[in-house]
Image (cartoon, rainbow, N blue to C red):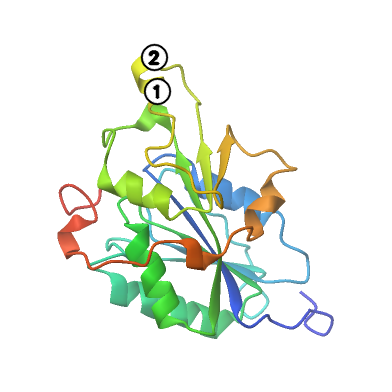
Amino acid sequence: MNHGSAPPRPLPYPLHIVAGGWGTGKSSLLNQLLELRPPDERWVVLQNDAGKSQVEAAPQRLPDNPIVVKEVVGVCACCTGQIVFVSALAALIRQTKPHRVFVEAASVALLSDLVGAVEQSFPGTVKLETVITLLDPSKNNRGNGSPVDEDQQRLADVIIVLDKHPVDQGTRASAAPLVPLSPQQRLIRGWPDRQTLPTLLRADSQRSTREHPGERSANECSPTGQPE
């Protein structure tokens, strides 16, 4: 990467959160979004979920690495591991000075607490641009009405509803959002095409329209309090 011609780093740093249940395609979506990176920019990813697929980092080492991926697994960033998550995000930004930041949320994460941690810990440094939630009715193993699913949808700017496998009529009905959409939220049915992908990086709504994060106990990030 040619540092002499690279554009200046933005401040605040634009940040995007990708959320959804386990196996819904968060890492796959991130890999496609990373393909949109301009050649003279550095984009970074902080993963808080260990799924089947992995986000692909560029092979170069810092300071010339255009795509940097850091993992924070084994803790949930919205509750028990919030301090670890915030510290890792701060270190990643400090070390890389990126042009764009992505966070892959744990499948059990309450976005209200995760968003609150980002906004309260990085005022003036990080700007939350978009929150993207993926739903896959064929992987609806938490049951309709799950507090985690409802929270991840309520905090989303974009909700992507997938239908990758044949499902029965009862499961197909669960593809509809569990909470009413606000005028600021977008609903996309099916995997985003190449024309749609760039729009996921543009903030079309104001973060002030989202609910203010509430107080929650550590075991409320999932019905069992443990990663699924």
Mark yes or no: residue 22 visible. Answer: yes
Question: On screen, 179 above or below 154?
Answer: above
User: What residue does disc 1 label?
Assistant: 173
Are discs 1 and 2 less than 8 Å apart at CB? yes
Circle number at residue 76: none
Residue appearing at x 37%, y 65% in the figure: 114
Q: Secondary structure at mark 1?
A: helix
Location of the C terminus (image quadrant): top left
Q: Amino acid at mark 1?
A: Ala
Seen from the viewer's position, the closer of residues 203 and 163 is 203
Label 1, label 2: how far apart the Cα atoms are: 6 Å
Q: Position of residue 68 (x, y in %)?
A: 57, 68
User: What residue does disc 2 label?
Assistant: 169
Q: Position of residue 70 (x, y in %)?
A: 47, 67
Residue appearing at x 50%, y 26% in the figure: 163
Seen from the viewer's position, the closer of residues 100 and 11 is 11
Q: Position of residue 85 (x, y in %)?
A: 36, 72
Location of the N terminus (image quadrant): bottom right
Taking the image as shown, residue 35 lies to the left or right of residue 46, namely right
Pointer 1 local density, CA inside 10 Å: few below 14, some 14–19, many at least 20 = few
State the residue lying farthest toward the top: 168
Taking the image as shown, residue 67 lies to the left or right of residue 223, namely right
Pointer 2 local density, CA inside 10 Å: few below 14, some 14–19, many at least 20 = few
Question: On screen, 223 above or below 118?
Answer: above
Question: On screen, 196 above or below 41?
Answer: above
Seen from the viewer's position, the closer of residues 216 and 190 is 216
Q: Amino acid at mark 2?
A: Gln
